[in-house]
Image: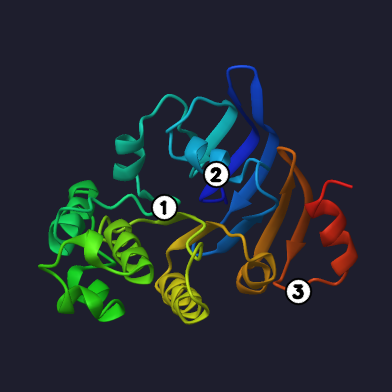
Amino acid sequence: MNPLLRLDDLRVTYGRVVAVKSVTLEVNEGQAVCLVGPNGAGKSSTLLAVMGAVRSRGDVLLRGTSTRGLRPEALAHLGVAMVPEGRHLFQTMSVQDNLSLGTLARRQGKRARIDERWVTELFPIIGQFASRRAGLLSGGQQQQVAIARALLSDPDLILLDEPSLGLSPVAVDAVFEVLERIRGVGVAILLVEQRAQRAIRFCERSYVLSDGEIRLEVTGGAVEDPQAVVEAYFGR
């Protein structure tokens, strides 16, 4: 059986700058996988390449079929959603208007696994602040809206880039509780996260990325050799 997502020797460059030298990884249906590593390791560029937002070499396979040349909107209609670093909400628009954008990518004729009622139950702030401008919410609340917007496309795979960045410890706990529930309904997760230990414990498989390359793979959410993770993280 083909994995839901496979990256095969993925490479990303920006002019003469090599952001991703070689990344090969897999995400199975309903599985949580993370990429951890230092700043500048190529984690965000990897997610952007999966979403078709930057040019890349190598290949991105969705259910065994190459997505080369597809734009982000086409990937969205194939069941891939992304929550970018910094959330990228429309600050002057209401929470409800921001959320409505997520429904535009819903696939026609597919029975929805995730609907507005489920998302509103998952994020009570949506009901509380539906008419409020998104820019007036706290960072943690904006992160919830960004994840909710992505979920309303009813994806099979959700890409999350640093969802805990800049959040309080309480808000971070809330984010990981939400991720657990997302995984619980069968949505696969590819997570880029600065909190390496937390992410590795959460995910079934983790990849340590350093200097644009996979240095170590950790399975089962347990780190048997912490020193190996540290050395891989810093590219030693």
Taking the image as shown, residue 157 lies to the left or right of residue 190, namely left
Sequence-earlier tag: 2 or 1: 2
**Which label belongs to residue 222?**
3
**Which label belongs to residue 230?**
none
Residue flagged by tag 3: what amino acid is it? Ala
Residue designated by label 2: 44
Q: Marks 3/1: CA distance?
A: 29 Å
Residue designated by label 1: 86
Tag in front: 2 or 1:
1
Taking the image as shown, residue 30 lies to the left or right of residue 202, namely left
Sequence-earlier tag: 2 or 3: 2
Q: Is residue 143 above or below residue 124?
A: above
Q: Marks 2/3: CA distance?
A: 24 Å
Label 1 packing within 10 angstroms: few (<14), some (14-19), many (20+) = some
Q: What kind of element bears circle 2?
A: helix
Q: Position of residue 225 (x, y in %)?
A: 88, 68
Q: Marks 2/1: CA distance?
A: 12 Å
Q: Residue at x 24, y 77 (%)?
A: 125
Q: Is residue 229 above or below residue 214?
A: below
